Image: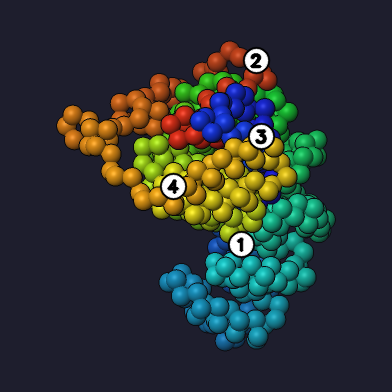
Amino acid sequence: MKTNHSIDISSQLKGMGTTGMNGFRTKRMFLAGAFAFAFTTACATGPRPTPVAMNAVEKPAVTVPAAAPTSAPAEKGDADGQFAQALKAYEAGDLDAARKGFEAVVSQEPKALNARFNLGVIAEKQNRPVDARAAYEQVLALDPAHTPSVMNLGLMHRHEGQLDEALSLYTKALQSPGHEHDEPVLNALAATYRLAGKLDEAEATGRRVLARSKDNPEAYKTLALVAYDRGQYRLAELLVVNARKVAQDDPAISNTLGMIYLKMDDRPRALAQFQKAVSLDDNFAPGHLNLGALALSYRDYAGAEKSFTKALSLEPDGVEGQLYLAYALDGQKGLDPKKGVAAGEVFEKVLARAADKPEAVCGAGWAYASDRAGFEKAIAFLDRCKELSATTEQDKQLITAKVNGLQNMLKNPPPAPAPAAATADAEGEPKKDAAATGGAGSSVMNQLPQDASAPEQGAPEAAPDAAPETAPAADEASGNGQAAPTPAPAP
């Protein structure tokens, strides 16, 4: 997906760390650029589409706008029964049967808007985005203010980084008579203005919602993120608190609070809010991504791996999640070279989605270099890394030396296994590295003080523009030079 319209967190990347044994500065430079646009998925994510009833009456849907039903011309005669059967098939998980049923309805009633909309929903679920887009556009050609189609098509535009198209879509819908104050569309418009960097327009649109609905949590969340973007963290906190009063179970609110506390340099409270987000909804992927990023900043690679794996189980196509999972695995290669190979494989998955992504090219090379089984791939990726325009002459020399060393090792027979005493403790258990396990073999995240106090009780005293100091993530044992990412908020 993904675009770079997330929070710019490059100012938080202080202290990029030492270069490690290999002194690979180019890799750090690439990572800094990547982290500045971290977790765009979180900012562009919305509720997944769900079908609407045949003749449902429109009702406000703030937290799940994509599911908001709207009025439509009645499907008559046999179309009624076909629509009901198609909806039943959908609910039973038989998407092919549901698709055929809704197509039959449309063939009889070409203006059956909800049947056309449901075909778009099914196409999305079957990973047919072109068909989904066509279905929503067909509905909007008949009714430009069909709210579910506006919301779903707008979300698709946002996922593809087509913010101008999304803004145009929302604006046209709001210009339809009787729809000037549609709250779901106004909230989507405000959020998209913010993603496009049009903060004044985003604020004005959010306040337009609150002028008619003073307790609208979506408007408060957008205004909080606008304040966050402007560095007004105290104001952002106040606005999020207002949102929480009317939407206590919304995980995105806790997630945004976590980001605010991170900016206030209060990591324990940030951690508590990220944990609360996933406790409210264990399927809230941005919360798991942010927990993983925070763990990575503490060099808790095992904890980061767990969080990123969970996030990817929820959003398998998230390039950022894949990239950070690779970093988490790479951080453990000093203990287990096989983790380096695993990291290389994940870096390759990133490259399958984003060809020639510099940090993935170079990352794969250094990750595969940790184990003899990956030496040949390491050489190939390091050679590619060497040819990148951003690679300095000094770094090219380092790569050349590393490649020559790997080639020489491949020419010689593999070394004999190390004595047991070198890899195990007195009781035969593998030795553990404190930086990777959190000191005593448990996640460092579990050892931090858990301050879960309500935000209303006051935030820590800090300058409004203070940025948290990101812990260097240079793994001296394995020659890593990677810097830890910093989480970004999800609207």
Q: Residues within 10 Å of mark 1 (few under 14, many from 20)?
A: many
SS for tag 2? loop
Q: Please report the residue visible at 70 percent of the width from the left and 81 percent of the height from the top.
A: 110
User: Residue visible at 47% across and 29% down?
Assistant: 476
Name which residue type carries label 1: Pro
Question: Mark 2 or mark 4, which is nearer the start of the sequence?
Answer: 4
User: Marks 3 and 2: which is nearer the front?
Assistant: 3
The label shown at residue 422 is: none
Three-letter code, disc 2 = Ala
2 and 1 marks in contact (CB < 8 Å): no
Task: Return the residue at label 3.
Answer: 394
Which residue has dot 1 on it? 69
* Residue depicted at 28% across the width and 39% down the height: 418
Of residues 122 and 4, which is closer to you in this image? 4
Circle 4 residue:
409
Task: Give the CA separation, mark 4 to mark 3.
Answer: 23 Å
Q: Where is residue 424 in the image (x, y as percent from the top left)?
A: 24, 34
For label 2, the residue is 463
Left/right placement of residue 32 relative to residue 293 reads: right
Tell us which disc is closer to us: 2 or 1: 2
The quarter of the rendered structure image containing the C terminus is top right
Viewer-side residue, 68 vs 357: 357
- How far apart marks 2 and 1 lie (CA) works out to 46 Å
